[in-house]
Amino acid sequence: MDRIELYRVFVRVVDCGGFTRAADQLKLPRSTVSEAVRTLEQRLGTRLLHRTTRRVTPTQDGLLFHARCQQLIADADEAEQLFRQSPQALSGRIKVDVPGRIGRLVIAPALPGFLQAFPQIDVELGMADRSIDLVEDGVDCALRVGPLQDSRLVARSMGQLPLINVASPAYVERHGMPMHPSQLGMHWGVLYASPGNGRVESWEWRENGVLRSQPLAGRVTVNSAEAYIACCIAGLGMIQIPAYDVRAELAAGSLLEVMPGHRADPMPMHLLFPHRRHPSQRLRVFVDWLQQVLLEVVG
């Protein structure tokens, strides 16, 4: 194993907090990973890791060496791409995590175009509506919608998702067409509880430049976008949803937009990165491609 590969192994062990998880991600035997770290410690003449039965943590020297290794690895990756002028020459794997609905409706349908433009880049696409640890899971970048929760991560704005209010024709027939938020007290909503904290979201709208909110009565509470939309189509209440999410249902007539003049504020989208180090060229071209896809499809 050459020196750069030893550095890669060490960085992954620190990021994962253990040898077994690092070995799984690197697709190497655990013994090989342990031996690589021992080799580095012998070469450097210092202990890099504190080892316990439950977790591995870097020593002070290990922390300093980890930061330097990250930069050396990034420099080596960049150097390997230095004379590859054409996009077809970029190679390697990118691990990405995105929300499920955006992944299925927006990114996956457009992905063949990226793979055709960059035939030597492979994409591992995870679709999760739960929070993940980018470092422990070895993710290069993750798309997140809504306010940012973790200030430790590097974030790049990817635009905003417009929200609309919708209800099913059956709901409107039964309860009438709401015309103004002042009528919300006479209507029902499908309630959405955040998967992260269980908090039920209020109905929001902007009026005269002021963001207002009001809890909406509802008999059904869900914690996924799929269930949220399905219950709305079933006539169980109104919902506020990103416009791209129900484009097909609006076109088919199974959902109707209500109170178009009183929408909630758009939701910010950010791409998160686990490290502040310079991203590889293959990751940069993927990020630029993803931003263009999101701008074209969701606004």
Image (spheres, helix red, strand yellow):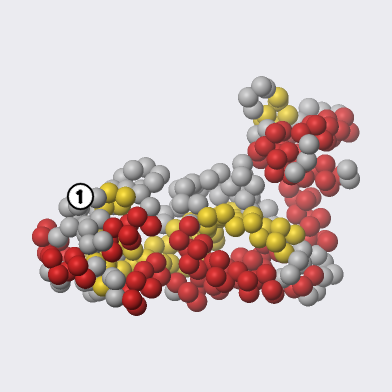
Identify the secondary structure beneath mark 1: loop
Could you say where residue 271 lies in the image, as x and y percent from the top left?
Answer: 54, 59
Residue visible at 28% across and 58% down in the picture: 231
Residue visible at 89% across and 45% down in the picture: 2
Residue 280 left/right relative to 137: right
Can residue 296 be seen in the rendering of this structure? yes
Q: Give the total of numbered labels.
A: 1
Quarter of the picture containing the C terminus is bottom left
**Above or below 48: residue 98:** below
Could you say where residue 87 lies in the image, as x and y percent from the top left?
Answer: 75, 73
**Above or below 13: residue 82:** below
Quarter of the picture containing the N terminus is top right
Query: Seen from this angle, which residue lies furthest top?
Result: 53
Q: Are there few (<14), some (14-19), or many (20+) residues within 10 Å of tag 1?
A: few
Which quadrant of the structure image shows residue 185?
bottom left
Can residue 265 be seen in the rendering of this structure? no
Could you say where residue 224 lies in the image, as x and y percent from the top left?
Answer: 38, 52
Residue highlighted by disc 1: 219
Residue 228 left/right relative to 56: left
Which quadrant of the structure image shows residue 230?
bottom left
Which quadrant of the structure image shows residue 49?
top right
**Above or below 283: residue 69:** above
Front residue (pair 12, 219)? 219
Residue visible at 57% across and 72% down in the picture: 110
